[in-house]
Amino acid sequence: MKKLLIFIPVLVFALLAAAFGLGASNRDLTAGFFQDLIDLFRFRLNPDAPRVVPPPNEVREPAQDQSKTEPYAPAADYENAVVGAVEKAAPAVVSIVITKDLPVIERCPYDPYGDLPPEFDEFFGPSPFQFYRQCQKGTKKQEVGGGTGFVVSSDGLVVTNKHVVADEDADYTVLTNDGGKYNAKVLARDPVQDLAVLRVDKKDLPTVALGDSDSIKLGQTAIVIGNALGEFRNTVSVGVISGLARTITAGDGLGSSETLEGVIQTDAAINRGNSGGPLLNLRGEVMGINTAMAFGAENIGFAIPINQAKRAIESVKKGGKITVPFLGVRYKLVTEELKEKEKLSVDHGALLRGGDDGPAVVVGSPADTARLMAEDIILEFDGQKIDQDHNLASLVQKRDVGDRVKLKILRRGKEIEAWITLGERGR
């Protein structure tokens, strides 16, 4: 009992120290103090009990200050690859601002009786009210839209969508990633694809690397960079390639539309304003040109394969314009469903058939010169079977103006061959 009374003041002192003198930085010291106290208490009650003695020169580390954080570093190889791809391509991605001279409308006072003959003045004297109507007071250059593009040559060539620069009366300005602002001239608009090439008067611009869109696989990572909503520059979204060789009809919301064949489908978000920007792989290479999004769906967007644009880019570099090979037919792609519906003898090929937009064979075209006819089925184009993976339009676009190609044709149940020299499509 005497021993217990001796240690009560010591215990009270320890509790007071813990309550008033210990903070977060002292917890390790407190734990050691109590351990020593317990050991001493045991020794007083039982002097023969063994004591736990800490090793000599042992130093307890103070608690780490959690308020200090290390700079962010990617946690995985995949994340590293995404960040690296964005950093590699972003300097060459540009914003395109569309401006136009628009009328300035104001409220102007007017006299509703001003056109009446003078003899009516006594009946319609000065009015106690002031009337106003809208009137034009000159014009003012205003921003009317925006899009995205990317630099493909250091001397100022920029690729974008044709629908971004479709207005020939508008002015276009390119904003670079480093804050530069340059007037842009539209060099060429592709008559077939949703592509256009611009030039800015600036040298030594950073450029993107063009990949091989024929090597794309379903499920591989897709990265979109663009001028989202026309105001958030270099916005990044990430997803996967969710479809290949799609055929879509894209509209601009103003009544204009066009059919795009062989496009890439992705679930990486393509927002309004992203049009004309690059679709990248994990190496930072351009695999496609963002061109459309599906309304009413969650993150379904489409991009033109970059291989379809390479020929147009080279054409502009060489001749200052986009030259497009031309066969001169309208057709329906033969599928199993069309075979059954039309009672056809084949399940592949291009069935030449006209529609509201014109005849099956364009008058004066290379197809007309070669005497192709409506209801002919082109089975092969220069040895390549025509099917859902190799449609006629994409095969034609891979060739040059002036190329001579051989067609295998099914006409009234009989196969024939025809040689055709591809012409140049006009605007």
Image: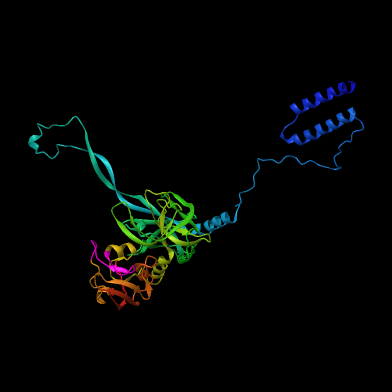
Magenta range is 342-358
x then y, percent, for residue 393: 34, 67
Q: Is residue 161 magenta?
A: no
Look at the picture and state if 25 lies above or below 207.
above
x then y, percent, for residue 23: 72, 32
Q: Quadrant of the N terminus?
A: top right
Q: In the drawing, does residue 50 fall left or right of residue 305?
A: right
Q: How is the image coloured?
A: rainbow
x then y, percent, for residue 144: 35, 50
Give the prevailing secondary structure in the magenta stretch: loop
Look at the picture and state if 75 lies above or below 372.
above
Q: Quadrant of the C terminus?
A: bottom left
Q: Quadrant of residue 13?
A: top right
x then y, percent, for residue 371: 24, 76
Q: For residue 200, say whether it is visible.
A: no
Which of these two is toward me, 242 or 233? 242
Which of these two is toward me, 111 or 1? 1
Which of these two is toward me, 352 or 130? 352
Q: Residue at x 59, y 56 (%)?
A: 77
